[in-house]
């Protein structure tokens, strides 16, 4: 169970103080697949940064299984069981996929154990296990490896920040299957996905809508999804990809 | 068994991955004298008449054989210059392992300057591994100045792995290569400096024949207050392909100067250089920390991978 109590986050820029998140109160329970959606710039990714410890809230507290983790570092939170798949997967020269999975699992995984995690994200394992996590891999491949590192952590609370960002439609279809499987296999953990893709929202147990820095809506999928369909908070994948292409061609 | 003390044995392990006598031909030099040598039917190791080094001759058609010629220095104040000449026949496929380990616990400088020359015959393939390592906490410096000259005959190839990861206070390494038609050279250099160390590494590869190629990649990490200077040059005199890449991570108060250069004297020469210097990216640290590593552990992983 992860709880946010009165969490706010402000930044100082040239226009003075700007409030990115305001008085967020959320409770995210075990065995739940939760999707956070909302318009761009609404504060979703900032919330992910606050959860994993990249940023500290300017007000409020964060509790994980009842323990106040507000002041804990990224490393300390990771060791308590919080994991994240970043929106932009990071590349490493010389570090192989298996190395990264071993770090994630915190033990010396055998190659075949490493392969199991890659198979879970739909990568033909033997083609990838020895590859370097560098720019020779496509955006979709890097994304799936990023997700595999989170699966390998077997974390109690996993955050996926816009898993659909930067990948093609075909990879997206595969990604949906990965998340559907995660939902089926959920045991005592919580999965939190930041996304406004309709197909990911459909997998959710709960949906949280964040807009203009506040929680606009939080409830069961069956209640929330019908209200947001067709808005920026629930976008059809094909339309989103067409829009992205049009922007790129403009 | 070799006549060596424990320090020398440890150095040998660092530079040549050897616990004891290697298979095949070898010459082991310890504190300026030979501590063991073996020639084989196809590979002859002989001392130069003037005593300045070795003549290593590999017969035509020698395949799947190796030569080890590591050097260890454990005496403070020892300075030596050694000339080793390798004459590799035609149609060979051999592994040559060199390397030098210095342990200096004293106050005087210890220095080993190795000049290695390779004549590689037609259609031969050579893999060359050279590792440098220094240890010991004396105030005397550990100095290594290797010079390597490579002459590749038609259709021959050489792959060089040059590694200096730890403990060498000062190094000036110069490598030159001349390639005839259809010859290929691949170099993978890895260099890490720390403390007040200084390392200079210069390559000049000349592609003289049509269809010749060179791929030179140097990766360096400069930590603490160390200094690295890397000068990678390719000259293309024919229809050839050349690529140099100089990729460095800078840390603490380290300083790095990278000077890639290309010279084309033929309209059909295709030459490319890349050079990049930067600190460890914040996102890389963040990713590894989110997997449970501390910042320091994450940094080590990134550097170890980079220099792998």
Image (cartoon, coloured by chain):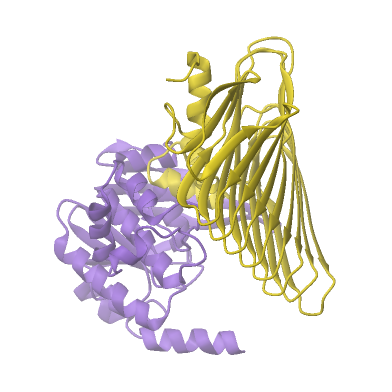
Q: Position of residue A143 (x, y in %)?
A: 40, 66
Q: Quadrant of the N terminus of chain B?
A: top left
The yellow-coloured chain is labelled: B
| Residue B188 against residue B234 in the figure, above or below | above
Front in this rendered view, residue A215 or A79: A79
List x then y, in percent, for residue A22: 46, 55
- Residue at horizontal 47%, vertical 28%? B13
User: In the rendered picture of this protein, how many numbered marks are placed on residues?
Assistant: 0
Up/down of A110 relative to A76, above or below = below
Query: Is residue A117 toward the left or the right of residue B158 in the image?
Result: left
Q: Is residue A221 visible?
A: yes
- Is A211 left or right of A66, judged from the image as shown? right
| Up-down relation of residue B292 to residue B34 (above or below) | below
Q: Nearer the viewer, residue B212 or B249?
A: B212
Measuring from the top left, give residue A179's x and y in whole percent: 26, 68
Q: Position of residue A4 (x, y in %)?
A: 35, 48
Determine the image quadrant of residue B224.
top right
Q: Nearer the viewer, residue B60 or B116?
A: B60
Instruction: Give the residue at x 54% y 90%.
Output: A246
* Left or right: where A103 falls relative to A33: right
Left or right side of B110 for A39: left
Query: In percent of the image, x 72 and y 13: which residue is there?
Result: B77
Is any part of residue B134 visible from this angle?
no
Furthest residue in direction top, as rendered:
B106
Q: Quadrant of residue B168?
A: top right
What chain is the purple one? A
């Amino acid at each position: 169970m992860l709880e946010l109590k009165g969490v706010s986050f402000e930044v100082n820029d040239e226009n003075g103080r700007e409030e990115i998140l305001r008085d967020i109160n959320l409770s995210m329970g075990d065995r739940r697949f939760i999707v956070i959606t909302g318009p761009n710039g609404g504060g979703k990714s900032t919330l992910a940064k606050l959860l994993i410890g990249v940023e500290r809230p300017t007000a409020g507290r964060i509790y994980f299984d009842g323990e106040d983790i507000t002041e804990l570092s990224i490393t300390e939170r990771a060791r308590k069981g919080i994991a994240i798949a970043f929106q932009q997967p990071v590349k490493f020269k010389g570090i192989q996929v298996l190395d990264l999975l071993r770090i994630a699992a915190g033990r010396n995984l055998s190659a075949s154990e490493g392969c199991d995690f890659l198979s879970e994200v739909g990568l033909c394992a033997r083609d990838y296990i020895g590859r370097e996590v560098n720019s020779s891999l496509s955006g979709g491949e890097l994304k799936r490896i990023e997700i595999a590192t989170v699966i390998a952590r077997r974390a109690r609370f996993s955050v996926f920040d816009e898993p659909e960002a930067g990948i093609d439609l075909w990879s997206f279809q595969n990604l949906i299957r990965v998340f559907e499987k995660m939902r089926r296999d959920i045991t005592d953990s919580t999965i939190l996905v930041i996304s406004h893709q309709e197909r990911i929202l459909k997998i959710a147990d709960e949906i949280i809508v964040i807009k203009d820095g506040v929680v606009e809506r939080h409830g069961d999928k069956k209640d929330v999804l019908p209200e947001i369909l067709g808005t920026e908070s629930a976008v059809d994948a094909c339309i989103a990809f067409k829009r992205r292409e049009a922007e790129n061609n403009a | 068994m070799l006549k060596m003390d424990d320090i020398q044995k440890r150095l040998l392990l660092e530079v040549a991955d050897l616990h004891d006598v290697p298979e095949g031909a070898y010459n082991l030099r310890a504190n300026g004298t030979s501590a063991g040598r073996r020639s084989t039917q196809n590979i002859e190791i002989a001392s130069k008449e003037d005593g300045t080094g070795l003549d290593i001759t590999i017969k035509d058609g020698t395949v799947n054989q190796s030569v080890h010629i590591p050097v260890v220095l454990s005496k403070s104040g020892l300075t030596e210059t050694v000339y080793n000449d390798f004459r590799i026949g035609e149609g060979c496929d051999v592994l040559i392992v060199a390397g030098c380990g210095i342990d200096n616990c004293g106050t005087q400088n210890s220095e080993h300057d190795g000049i290695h020359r390779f004549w590689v015959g037609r259609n031969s393939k050579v893999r060359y591994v050279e590792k440098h390592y220094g240890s010991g906490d004396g105030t005397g410096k550990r100095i290594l100045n290797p010079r390597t000259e490579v002459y590749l005959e038609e259709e021959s190839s050489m792959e060089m792995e040059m590694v200096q990861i730890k403990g060498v206070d000062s190094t000036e390494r110069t490598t030159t290569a001349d390639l005839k038609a259809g010859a290929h050279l691949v170099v993978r250099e890895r260099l890490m400096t720390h403390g007040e160390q200084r390392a200079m590494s210069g390559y000049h590869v000349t592609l003289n024949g049509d269809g010749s190629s060179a791929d030179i990649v140097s990766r360096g990490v400069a930590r603490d207050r160390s200094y690295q200077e890397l000068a990678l040059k390719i000259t293309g005199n024919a229809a050839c392909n050349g690529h140099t890449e100089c990729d460095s991570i800078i840390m603490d108060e380290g300083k790095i100067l990278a000077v890639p250069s290309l010279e084309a004297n033929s309209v059909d020469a295709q030459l490319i250089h890349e050079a990049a210097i930067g600190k460890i990216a914040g996102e890389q640290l963040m990713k590894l920390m989110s997997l449970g590593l501390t910042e320091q552990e994450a940094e080590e992983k990134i550097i170890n991978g980079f220099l792998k």
